[in-house]
Image (cartoon, rainbow, N blue to C red):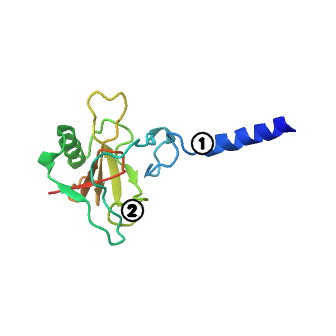
Amino acid sequence: MKLAWAFSCILALSAILGGCGKNGSQNATQEPGASASQAPGQLGQAASNTPAASSAQGQSAPVTVTKAQLPGEAAETLRLIKAGGPFPFGEDGVLFRNSAALLPQHPRGYYHAYTVRTPGSADRGQRRIVCGGPRRQTGDCYYTDDYYASFKRIAE
């Protein structure tokens, strides 16, 4: 009887922790027709010192940065967005749901996420640019260096 109870506890704990793993709650999702192997597979670990963008429920707007204040790799990502690619990662351009409401609210499909390379990183790293509106437009873009925990609006 104790063995069955212990096994049940282990199974329940496994199910709970399974939802908290690397591929647990994702904010960026695939567009229709994209393969599951292209889904982003990394969650941020700790928020940086960057002030978090607030939700659209009456709190302050995201901090604004100029393109010159961004890392050089972000400028390259913006150039690729304007050109329509080719992007270095298959996950670039995936739908960004804004489920945490850190960016201004828009209909589903408005935002798309792109990788900003991180020198020395063995994977895609935590840096992303999220742009809203039609593809190749960079007028409504946001930078995050902590995998969507906070955002900075990129000034035109």
Image x and y of residue 129, in percent: 28, 48
Q: Is residue 92 above or below residue 59?
A: above
Secondary structure of the residue carrying numbered label 1: helix
Residue occupying image coordinates x 53% and y 40%: 21
Amino acid type indicated by mark 1: Leu
Image x and y of residue 62, in percent: 26, 60
| Residue 154 seen by the camera | no
Residue tagged by mark 1?
A: 17
Nearer the camera: disc 2 or disc 1: 1
Image x and y of residue 59, in percent: 31, 68
Q: Which mark is residue 116?
A: none
Name the quadrant of the N terminus: top right
Amino acid type indicated by mark 2: Ala
Q: Is residue 119 left or right of residue 28?
A: left
Name the quadrant of the C terminus: bottom left
Residue occupying image coordinates x 20% and y 59%: 139
Q: Is residue 12 above or below residue 51?
A: above
Residue occupying image coordinates x 60% and y 42%: 17
Q: Nearer the viewer, residue 62 or 82?
A: 62
Residue tagged by mark 2?
A: 101
Residue occupying image coordinates x 18% and y 43%: 75
Crowding at dot 2, Cα within 10 Å, few <14 / some 14-19 / many 20+, comes out as some
Q: Nearer the viewer, residue 23 or 84?
A: 23
